[in-house]
Structures are given as structure tokens and as C-alpha cells.
Amino acid sequence: MAEQVSNIAGYRFVDLPDRDHLRQPFLEKCQEAGLRGTVLLSHEGINFFLAGAKQGIDAYIDFLNEDSRFADMTLKYSFTDYQPFNRMNVRLKKEIISLGMDNVKPAQRTGDEITPTEFKQWLDEGREVAIIDTRNDYEIRLGTFQNAVDLDIKSFRAFPEAVKNLPVEMKDTPVVMFCTGGIRCEKASVVMMDAGFSNVKQLKGGILGYFEEVGGEYWDGDCFVFDHRVALRPDLEQSDVVQCFACRQPLTVEEQQSPEYVVEESCPHCIHLR
């Protein structure tokens, strides 16, 4: 039986003035450890998705902990029966999550976190709360929290403009925002605070952290992930969602039954573009 592949994801907003000099050591360590995936390095921080044997992942974590800026990072683990990445890349980026606003610096200031357990307690108690989904429209199609606000954005760069269209009365309502793993909310919370929202919290660990800590209550559907698994169920197992080869849109089981879905050719989302 094939050994399970360990998957790891993590990020941290931290000033990295030596970004350019970090690329080669990271690449060499990941290659030496037999890992594949992507490490993004920016002056604002680090973001990575890696997969390989457990001992390789452990070696990478030891390497991270040698630098105080990366030590004791919150990490997300999962397992697959296959290697989900084709190659190893270490990329230098302007931002580890693209927003295009230089004044948003999560390493210096960000919204308070709310744990999944506390958030679920709020929902259990029926508290007044505005739940904001900061993700893109194609992610939200697959699943979201019950009663969450869908901003109908195609990319995270559209988030600041969408915030301007939220009701004024929401500015004094407790807000809990969420994304897949938490990274987008670090920046999104700053945008919302700057827009005058007085009580902004971000879901610690994002949707995946919620699934891991409290399960799937108050969640409908699956959660899109940015790797070959495409989407996960609340039990953190791979769902039956696939991606269209032509346009990369995720497709639910129902959409896969459509006559417009032809493997490697088209789907209901891109058939009209042919």
C-alpha cells in the first residue's frame, strides 16, 4: 500500500526586507526534503502549500523554526493518497495575497480573531452578527456559512470596492469575516476597519480551521481549496467536486451531469465562450 502524502499549508505576515536572499535557501531545503508545492515570499511575509513524505515535512518545519520570524507558525495538515503538486516553486511576489493596497499592512495591524468554538457559540445563541464571506464567487458557489453575506466578487482585489456597498447600519454590527484558511481576512479586516466598521473579527484558521475544530454545523456545501483536491467536505475529506479543464471553474456533482460538461472541453460556465 502506498504511503500517504503529507500536505502542509501556512502563512505569516512579517516584514522580510531580505526577501530576495531567502529564495535560494528555501528552494534548496524543500528540494533536499523531497517536497513539491509552492512557497511565496514577499516583503510582507510568507505563504506556502507543500506536500511530501512526513520526514520531509518535519525537516521543513525544523528549517522554519531556525528563523524567529517563521518560528511556531500555525500550520494546517492534511493527507492524500497521491502527490497533489507537479513541481517545487519558490516565488518572489509583491504580496503573498494580492489586494493592491500598500497601506494595508497586517504585520503592523489587523482585526481581532474569533476562535471557531466561540463563533459557533455565537451562532448557537442566535447573536446579532454580520457574517462576511471574503472569497471569490466561484468558491462561494460550492458552499458557505448559513446567512453569510456574498459580496459577489471575482477576485480579492475587488473586495475594498464591495465593502463600500455594504449597508451603513452594518458598521456598528459585530462582523465576523472568513476565508479558506485565514490569510485573506488578515487584510480584509484592515480594509473594513479603515472603512469605519467598529467591531470586526476574523475567523481564526478560516473555514478549514472551523471544520477541524467544530465540524460542519451552520455550513452548507463544500469548501474550495487551491490544489488538486479542488474541494473538501466538512469532515476534511476530498469531495466529488472537479474542475473544468477548459476554464478551471469548480463543478458540483449536479453540474457534472449537465450535457454542457464535456471532459477537457467545456462546462456550463464556459460553453458560451466557445
Image: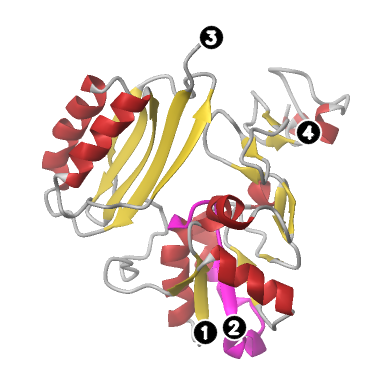
Within 10 Å of disc 2 (Cα), the crowding (few <14, some 14-19, many 20+) is some
Q: In the structure shown, which secondary structural element does the residue marked by tag 3 occupy?
A: loop
State the image coordinates of residue 223 (x, y, percent, origin top left). 64, 46
Q: Name the foreground residue: 263 vs 62.
A: 62
**Dots 2, 1 in contact, CB < 8 A:** yes
State the image coordinates of residue 76 (x, y, percent, origin top left). 44, 45
Q: Is residue 34 above or below residue 146?
A: above
Identify the amino acid type marked 2.
Pro
Give the labeled residue for mark 1. Answer: 199
Mark 3 → mark 4, Cα distance in angstroms: 44 Å
Magenta residues span 161-183
Q: Which numbered disc flags the more N-terminal residue, 4 or 2? A: 2
Residue 174: assigned label: 2
Q: Which numbered disc flags the more N-terminal residue, 1 or 4? A: 1
Identify the amino acid type marked 3.
Met
Nearest to the eye among marks 1 and 3: give it: 3
**Dots 1, 3 in contact, CB < 8 A:** no
Give the labeled residue for mark 4. Answer: 272
Mark 1 → mark 3, Cα distance in angstroms: 51 Å
**Dots 2, 3 in contact, CB < 8 A:** no
Nearest to the eye among marks 3 and 4: give it: 3
**Dots 1, 4 in contact, CB < 8 A:** no
Q: Residue at x 76, y 29 (%)?
A: 267
Q: Which numbered disc flags the more N-terminal residue, 1 or 3? A: 3
Residue 171 colored magenta? yes
Task: Determine the image quadrant of residue 257.
Answer: top right
Q: In the structure shown, which secondary structural element does the residue marked by tag 1 occupy?
A: loop
Nearest to the eye among marks 4 and 2: give it: 2
Q: Which numbered disc flags the more N-terminal residue, 2 or 3? A: 3
Give the labeled residue for mark 3. Answer: 1
Q: Residue at x 65, y 68 (%)?
A: 120
